[in-house]
Amino acid sequence: MKKLVHLSIKGKVQGVGYRAFVELQAELHGLEGWVRNRRDGSVEALAEGSGDAVEKLVKACWQGPPSALVTRVEVSDGDPKLLALCPAGEKFGMLPTI
């Protein structure tokens, strides 16, 4: 059964390779979706896949790359319409900052 989550990650998560980290983790776990920076300094992600794979991504988001300092990971149900934001031809990709 597929699970779709929307993540909001806060802390020192920009300028440390956090989006690339999330993209790699998502690809390793076979997830679909995207990740992007937000102008408020947070990182936002949408991920869809098996419940187990999604939980592994959420756990990895709490850790992040070595230079990150994650203080909060908010998890909510994802909106399926937002999956269409993923770059064409990519299963999981990075979006521009909003």
Image (tube, rainbow, N blue to C red):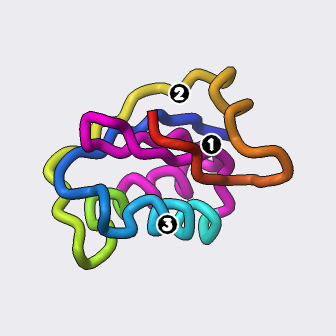
In this image, 89 relative to 15: left or right?
A: right
Residue range corresponding to the magenta coloring: 30-58
| Helix, strand or loop under label 2 | loop
Which amino acid type is marked by label 1?
Glu
Q: Name the residue under label 3.
A: 20
Q: Which residue is drawn at 45% across and 52% down?
A: 55
Q: In this view, does 65 lie above or below 19?
A: below
Question: How far apart are the alpha carbons under marks 3 and 2?
Answer: 21 Å
Which amino acid type is marked by label 3?
Ala
Where residue 68 appears, as percent x and y from the top left, is: 23, 67
Which quadrant is the N terminus positioned in? Answer: top right
Q: Residue at x 39, y 52 (%)?
A: 58
In this image, 64 relative to 70: left or right?
A: right
Q: Residue at x 35, y 58 (%)?
A: 61
Q: Mark 2 points at which residue?
A: 78
Q: Are marks 2 and 1 in contact (CB under 8 Å)?
A: yes
Mark sitting earlier along the chain (1/3): 3
Which amino acid type is marked by label 2?
Gly
The residue closer to the viewer here, 32 or 90, is 90
Q: Name the residue under label 1.
A: 48
| Helix, strand or loop under label 1 | strand
Where residue 28 appears, as percent x and y from the top left, is: 61, 71
In this image, 69 relative to 47: left or right?
A: left
Q: Residues within 10 Å of mark 1 (few under 14, many from 20)?
A: many
Which quarter of the picture shows residue 18?
bottom left
Where residue 8 appears, as percent x and y from the top left, is: 34, 38
Which quarter of the picture shows residue 67?
bottom left
